[in-house]
Amino acid sequence: MQYMPHVFHRGKHVFDRFAVIFTVVIVWIYAHLLTVGGAYNDAAPKTQASCRTDRAGLLGAAPWIRIPYPFQWGAPSFDAGEAFAMMMASFVALVEVCSLCFSLFMFSSATMVPPSILSRGVGWQNAGLLALTRVGSRRVVQISAGFMIFFSILGKFGALFASIPAPIIAALYCLFFGYVGAGGLSFLQFCNLNSFRTKFILAFSIFLGLSVPQYFNEYTLVNGYGPVHTGGRWFNDIINVPFQSKAFVAGCLAYFLDNTLHRDAGIRKDRGKHWWDKFWSYSGDTRSQEFYSLPFNLNKYFPSV
């Protein structure tokens, strides 16, 4: 044991970068040993479903090679009502992803995200992982995409990763969402927190952002449908889905209050707007090219302004 401190010191960067992978593998192996040893044999069905690594014959039933092909689940169908419901769900996701983009630039030590970059940042939803590993390289994302294609074709490997017990995934979410929340709260450093206007907007939006979605979710859980319950299911989804998102409710309410409540000349500094002035244009900071330029000279075809 006296050599362990030397091992951790020499591999400091390795343990920092791959802490998540090492932790998942260790706990995953431990869960598999418990499964093989019969620790879950007499457990409740719900416990077995979430903790066993061999549930439902996942590995045995998966084929070695499976090529996805179009229309494998039938011919596509179109419903106008469902399309509008999905548009609303996409709008909610768009609001949430925009907040993730702002967290990403802080965790990656980059400059403020120019507005033109947000339009292509919808896929940046790994803010918690970036904060935990401190790896923000595009090459990592490209290699990960290759792995996803690889595991989708080789069914056995995909089933192996699908056998990760749900509590391990839940523990990862506790870390990732904690980092995302901390990234959002860190933006308050640019506001004047001694201002009663700022305190009111924060308190009111956070309280309603937590309570309104909680009401909608509990109402749906008890009754089987949301508070808005009409003959048109698509209309119900358009109203109920946005109000079930805490980030959407709190963000939209805070945005509305911040842009309508007592907007005089001195308020702009309390809002922290002066910190972002030079970043509203892509060319406002010389480092934007370093952080946000597209690879393979794609900026020529998708220019940022």
Image (cartoon, rainbow, N blue to C red):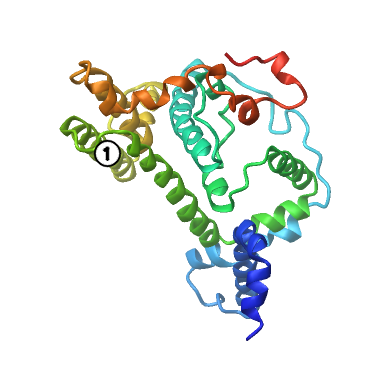
What quarter of the picture does the C terminus occupy? Answer: top right
What quarter of the picture does the N terminus occupy? Answer: bottom right
Q: In the image, residue 263 lies at what x, y percent?
A: 22, 17
Q: Is residue 48 above or below residue 174?
A: below
Q: Quadrant of residue 70?
A: top right
Residue type of the residue flagged with mark 1: Ile
Q: In the image, residue 253 lies at what x, y percent?
A: 28, 27
Q: Quadrant of residue 54?
A: bottom right
Residue at image position (54%, 52%) is 132
**Crowd band around label 1 with a 10 angstrom C-alpha radius: few (<14), some (14–19), many (20+):** some
Label 1 belongs to which residue? 206
Along the viewing direction, whichever of 149 and 196 lies nearer the viewer: 196
Instruction: Tell whether 293 sits left or right of 84.
Output: right
Q: Is residue 1 visible?
A: no
Q: Is residue 281 visible?
A: yes
Instruction: Tell whether 111 sits left or right of 137.
Output: left
Q: Is residue 165 above or below residue 198?
A: below
Q: Secondary structure at mark 1?
A: helix
Residue at image position (34%, 30%) is 251
Q: Residue furthest left?
A: 196
Q: In the image, residue 288 lies at what x, y percent?
A: 59, 25
Q: In the image, residue 178 lies at what x, y percent?
A: 43, 51
Q: Is residue 295 above or below residue 103?
A: above
